[in-house]
Image (cartoon, grey):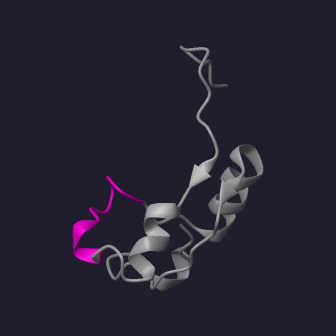
Amino acid sequence: MLLLTTAEVPGPIDNQQLIGTLHGTMSQKELVPGTDYVQVSSAMWQFLHAIYGGGPAIELPLDPVLPESSITSHY
């Protein structure tokens, strides 16, 4: 069980900056994995989206460090 230490709950997922990257208004080299975004499995995306809403889902190529069978990327 997770107990919140603050009354503030995170807001909806906001991928608008990532959308800009995909459309060429921001360089992908400017994005820092783990800081600006994280890759999550499809199941984890669905779980988080069901709780927080927002989006949109963005499917990108798999992280080459992770085995293909373990992740389907959504941002």
Which quarter of the rendering shows the N terminus? top right
List the single residue furthest toward the front: 25
Q: Is residue 49 left or right of residue 67?
A: right
Disc tally is: 0
Q: Is residue 7 left or right of residue 21?
A: right
Quarter of the image where one finds residue 66: bottom left
Using the image as rendered, state which of residue 2 and residue 34 is in the foreground: 34
Using the image as rendered, state which of residue 59 and residue 23 is in the foreground: 23
Taking the magenta stretch, the answer to whether it contains residue 31 is yes
- The residue drawn where x is 49% and y is 72% is 19
- The residue drawn where x is 27% and y is 76% is 27
Taking the magenta stretch, the answer to whether it contains residue 45 is no
Quarter of the image where one finds residue 67: bottom left
List the single residue furthest toward the right: 50
Residue 26 on image: x %, y %: 32, 73
Magenta region, main secondary structure: loop
Residue 69 on image: x %, y %: 54, 82
Q: Which residues are magenta?
A: 28-37
Rendered position, 62 above or below 42: below
Rendered position, 6 above or below 74: above
Using the image as rendered, state which of residue 17 and residue 70 is in the foreground: 17
List the single residue furthest toward the left: 29
